[in-house]
Image: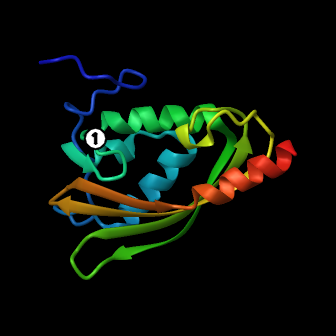
Amino acid sequence: MADVPTRSGFDYRVRPAPLCHSGSVLEPKQVAQAYARWIADGEPEFQAMMSPDLHDHVSGRRGPETWDMVWGWIEASFDQRRAELHGWGSLDDGRIAVWVTLHGRHIGLGMPWLGDRAPSGAQIAWKQLHVFATEGDRLTEHWAVRDDLRVIEAVDAANG
């Protein structure tokens, strides 16, 4: 087996997905709550729901380990994080939608779209809508719409 980049020694290939409430498919509430815990605290339950070849349409990459990279960016950019979960549901085609805002304080340059903006201490509210395709008990695809501009504006305003 090839080496897989992992965070905190967690290997996504060998850990089974968490048991779903229905026993066979992921439920929107379950995915939404796991995502909120992941974006705020990096809890691995969310990544354990992913298929080994999950296609992230945002980055163009495949696999749960892509999310280790994103978590590193979040952790290096914002502290005092908390997720405000606004809602979740099933779309007409069966995909799962999750609406969340990540609140936190800007402390660094981890997110690539922040460019070279100095740590500002700005309080941010990063609004996001995520859509996940599923197959049985695994997430197989991901799309997102995020309000990165509002975060950049808050950081720029705090930096004067």
| Residue drawn at x 34%, y 43% as measured from the top left | 47
| Residue drawn at x 63%, y 57% as measured from the top left | 149
- Up-down relation of residue 7 to residue 143 (above or below): above
Q: Is residue 51 visible?
A: no
Question: Which residue position is annotated with label 1?
Answer: 61
Q: Is residue 65 visible?
A: yes
Which amino acid type is marked by label 1? Arg
Image position, residue 156 (x, y; %): 77, 48
Q: Residue furthest right?
A: 160
139 on left or right of 69: left
Q: Quadrant of residue 32?
A: bottom left
| Residue drawn at x 57%, y 61% as measured from the top left | 147
Q: Quadrant of residue 78?
A: top right
- Up-down relation of residue 54 to residue 100 (above or below): above
Camera-side residue of 58 and 19: 58
Element under disc 1: loop
Image position, residue 60 (x, y; %): 29, 45
101 on left or right of 124: left
